[in-house]
Image: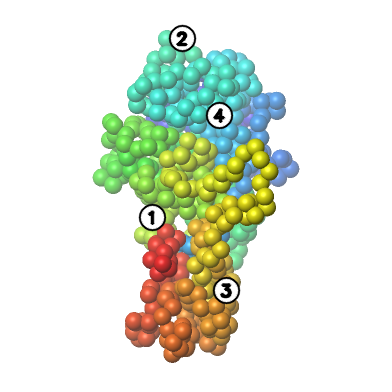
Amino acid sequence: MTFAIKCLDCGHTAEYYPASINCPRCDSQWREAEYDYKAISEIFQRETTNRPFDLWRYRELLPVRNPVPSLRLGEGGTPLIQAVNLGMMLGCPNLFIKDERQGPTGSFKDRQAAVTIAALKEAGITEMVAASTGNVAISYSAYASRASIKLWAFVTSLVPAVKMREIALYGSQVVKVTGSYDQAKQMAAEFARQRNLYLDMGARTITSIEAMKTIAFELAEQLAIQLGPSVSPDGNSTGAWRAPDWYIQAISGGMGPIGVYKGFRELQQMGLIDRMPAIAPIQAAGCAPMVLSWRRGLESVEPVANPQTHIETLATGDPGRAYKILRKQVLESRGTFESVTDEEAFRAMHVLAKMEGISAEPAAAVAFAGLFKLIRSSVIKPTDTVVINCTGHTMPAEQSILGDNWSRNVVLPSGEEIPQDGLLAALNNVAPDRFPRVAVVDDSADARRLIRRILQSQGNYAISEAADGRQGLELIQRELPDLVILDIMMPEMDGFAVMDELRAHHDTASIPVIVSTAKELTSQEKSLLKGQIQSLMQKGDFLNDEFLEEVRALIK
Ligand SMILES: [Zn+2]
């Protein structure tokens, strides 16, 4: 084991003991683990490939001397999922989701808990204190129970009751603080000081940052498998693994990206990747001290005293020094900070679930809403490879964002045999037999699939497709749909010719048409369409909500 703890303020290096949290020379609490990267790089890649795909695969770069297998719950090793539909919708095909929902308790904090509890167990610590907005306490509780460590979890009263009960279920003592998260943190610190207990220090905890690094290790390995190792413009391999162009994560205290960035830096030092990704930490606008301070060019953070967001998980009003560290990383990597409203996050949560089959918690949806913003403002380019950290369970949120009428209810009379025709009559209320009909004419199978997917996410359209202009015209003349979605650039008979034919015949002349086009039309082409169509959609540039509004407006 070749690592030491280096002070970020005075540079003093000391041995690692989990319970000693201050620099022995200058008393600073901001320190980080430093390894003998040269020695490790000689064995790292070879050793890791022979191990199971979990976070202990990278144990040479973790601050636990002898990880005990009996404490494990399957931490790390989460899938990297390509978001094909979302990528198509946003015109940015290389979008990947690091699916941290698949950790043992459903959040990326499981990494932090697994590594921290392993280190505490190794050091003989039996009782600890942590303040949490929910997920950290759940993760710690699960791992602490396996390690027979007693956990005092200080949570704010805004943490959803389901999360509090889960913490208690693992045997932790829940201390509910009616106050802000920052106040809960202060109380936890005072409680730990009085009883001389180990206190989780968030982003200042060595094991937390070290645990988060494994996200970078995993995704660089996974990207190399999915996209191939990184290559220079002249085609030479420039590293066995591959860094994305962007790494996006929603933040509260900022620990996630700080650790992930350190992970990428270590991979670069060892020659496994050729460059650093740009980092984009995203905050909820109602509690965005880092974003506001970044925009004002401040070097130290100005805290937010009264967080105004429903996304409690992200309500760190005073991130303190973490901002400085993150700001430096964002500057170095040419990344950016961004904020989104709760509403934008809830919308993104819907889009993600409907387009990709992934239900994320609102905190993770903040990252996706940030992604949408950064792509729309061209900060992220269409050719960029982007990885978004996705975490969490939805249970507390569905109730508040789904609204009414999300289910169709069938109430059958009880206690008696129901005749067959009675069942059929009841089913008629479930799905009316005539849905609005939409014809999609596009020579790209991918585009047809995307449009079908967006329409189906609403569940109420009968969709038929044609793969070229000629077939499309026949389809429209035969079925007389309520709406046509028409591509312009198609071989043989293009969209303009289809339009001419439709308008020339009485029965098709009044069918509304939305033109979707992959290229920017010339002004001459636009004038050809003028008065002929209801709407023009640039492919890869429309978000499904806008598109659906258009569709709804045209089909009555
Ligand atoms: Zn020091």
Q: What residue type is labelled 3?
A: Glu
The residue indicated by pointer 4 is: 139
Rendered residue at 37%/37% (across/down): 310
Can residue 127 be seen at all in this image of the molecule?
Answer: yes
In the depicted structure, whether residue 46 falls above or below residue 73 = below
Mark 4–mark 3 contact, CB under 8 Å? no
Report how far apart the C-alphas of labels 2 and 4 lie in the structure.
Answer: 23 Å
Between marks 2 and 1 in the image, the one whose residue lies nearer the viewer: 1
The residue indicated by pointer 1 is: 373
Q: Which amino acid does label 4 sit on?
A: Ser
Q: Residues within 10 Å of mark 1 (few under 14, many from 20)?
A: some
Can residue 95 be seen at all in this image of the molecule?
Answer: no
List x then y, in percent, for residue 87: 51, 60
Hey, which quadrant is residue 509 in on the image? bottom left
Rendered residue at 64%/41% (across/down): 77
List x then y, in percent, for residue 392: 52, 39
Hey, which quadrant is residue 293 in on the image? top left
Q: What residue type is labelled 1?
A: Lys
Between marks 1 and 3 in the image, the one whose residue lies nearer the viewer: 3
Q: Does the residue labelled 4 lie within 8 Å of ligand 1?
A: no
